[in-house]
Image: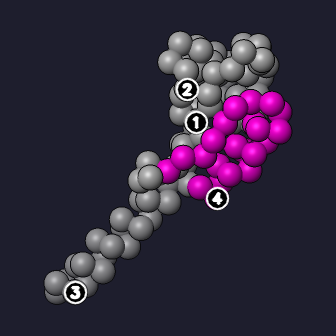
Amino acid sequence: MLNNYDLEESIQALLANSRTSDWSIVLYNDEVNTFDWVIDCLVKYCGHDEIQAEQCAWFVHTKGKYAVKKGPQQSLKPICQTLIEKGLSAVLESEYE
C-alpha cells in the first residue's frame, strides 16, 4: 500500500511524463504556399497520409492556424524546424503556456 508521500511522488511523476507529450506543431495560413506544397510537407515530414494532410491544410486555410501534430517536444522540434525551412509558417507550442 502506498503512503501519502509515495502517492504524491507517483502523481508528480505521471504529471511530468504527461506534460512532455503536450506539445503541438501549429501551422499558420499564409499567402505564399500552395495547398499541394503544404500537403506534400505534411505527408513527408509529419507522417500524415494524403487525406489527413489535406484535411489539415483545409483547417489551416479556413481557421488561420491548426495544430497539425502533437507529441513530445524533443520529437516535434526537428519536424517544426524542417517545416519552417521548407517555407511554412509553423511554431512549436506547449499546451501549458
Q: Which residue is mark 4?
A: 74
Q: Which residue is mark 1?
A: 26
**Three-letter amino acid code at disc 4?**
Gln
Where residue 25 sits: x, y (%)? 60, 40
Packing grade of label 3 (10 A; few <14, some 14-19, many >=20) is few
Q: Disc 2 vs disc 1: Cβ atoms closer than 8 Å?
A: yes
Q: Disc 2 vs disc 3: Cβ atoms closer than 8 Å?
A: no
Q: Which residue is mark 3?
A: 5
State the CA–CA distance, disc 1 to disc 3: 38 Å
Where residue 17 sits: x, y (%)? 44, 65
* Quarter-of-image position of residue 32: top right
- Mark 3 secondary-structure assignment: helix
**Three-letter amino acid code at disc 2?**
Lys
- Mark 4 secondary-structure assignment: helix
State the CA–CA distance, disc 2 to disc 3: 43 Å
Residue 73 versus residue 8 in the image, above or below: above
Q: Quadrant of the N terminus?
A: bottom left
In terms of sequence position, does the residue under pointer 2 or pointer 4 come before the other?
2
Residue at image location 66% in from the left, 36% down from the top: 90
Residue 46 left/right relative to 94: right
Q: Which residue is mark 2?
A: 65
Residue 5 left/right relative to 20: left
Residue 59 left/right relative to 83: left
